[in-house]
Image (cartoon, rainbow, N blue to C red):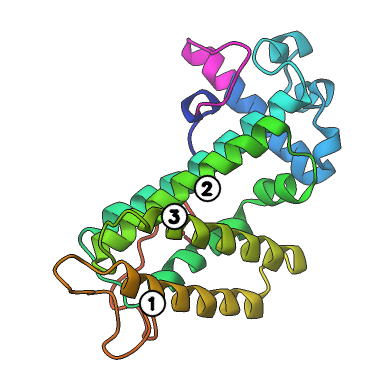
Amino acid sequence: MSGPSAEETGAVLRRTPQQARSKARLARVLKAAERVLIAEGVPALTTTRVAAEAGVSVGSLYQYLPDRDAIIDALAATYFAQLEGVMEEFVRSAATERWADPVGVLIDTYAGLYRTEQGFRALWFGSGLTDRTRAADREHKRRMADGVRRVLVALGIAGDTEGLGHACHAAVLAADALAQEAFRRDTEGDAALLDEAKVMLRGYLTALAGRHGRRDGRQEGRQEGGAVGDAPLSGPVPRPAGRPGSAP
């Protein structure tokens, strides 16, 4: 696991570590929890098992993560922050680059994350999400949708209209469902299903470009006379640092 620490992601901890030593201990605990999650599944995420894996006392773990639900919530918050961090990098890249196939860029990069983040897959497919994590996931998808909205606006594909945010939220929900099914079928991601997801979302993006066109009437990301994303990338795909294969 890489990326922000649990307290940096907004995860609800029993106690927030203040000193560097305490923060390092919590990070070690979360890495240990992820190892247990990948190897043994969600049911194994007990405080006793995770403490043993991390080489800390149960009492030390309890200061921050008092039970399995808290461990699950902290892991999920870390994964959310990683995914959102990648989206923020796309938003920044979209301000200076033009991509012929924005759908392909996003799906390929996030599929790469699904492949490399075994803990993320194990948590989501393990049927052990807490009510708090499910609620956090709903908010996470809204933040991801806002990132997609900002990417489309930056690329000149759509104007920042009132309905664009709702449309992007629908696109994120659809993409997430298809991606999860693709990786349930195959740990590398069912290539045929991911390709179909691209076809579907390109068509939706083309419809969005028509419904939420730029105020000046231009739609720079759209291929002349056709759908968005029918051509190969016109520039380099942004690859967030430290994310192999990197972009629901």
Q: Looking at the figure, which quarter contains the N terminus? A: top right
Q: Is residue 230 visible?
A: yes
User: Which residue is rendered at x = 46% and y = 73% of the image?
Assistant: 204
The image shows residue 149, relative to residue 182, as above or below, that is above
The residue stretch that appears in magenta: 10-25
Of labels 3 and 1, earlier in sequence is 3
Relative horizontal placement of residue 197, taking residue 29 as reference (left or right) = left
Residue 173, percent across and down? Answer: 57, 57
Q: Are marks 2 and 1 in contact (CB under 8 Å)?
A: no
**Circle 3 is placed at which residue position?**
166
> Foreground mark, 3 or 1?
3
Q: Amino acid at mark 2?
A: Lys
Q: Residue furthest bottom?
A: 225
Closer mark to the observer between disc 3 and disc 2: 3
| Residue underneath mark 2 | 141
Marks 2 and 1, Cα distance to the nearest angstrom?
Answer: 21 Å
Residue type marked 1:
Thr
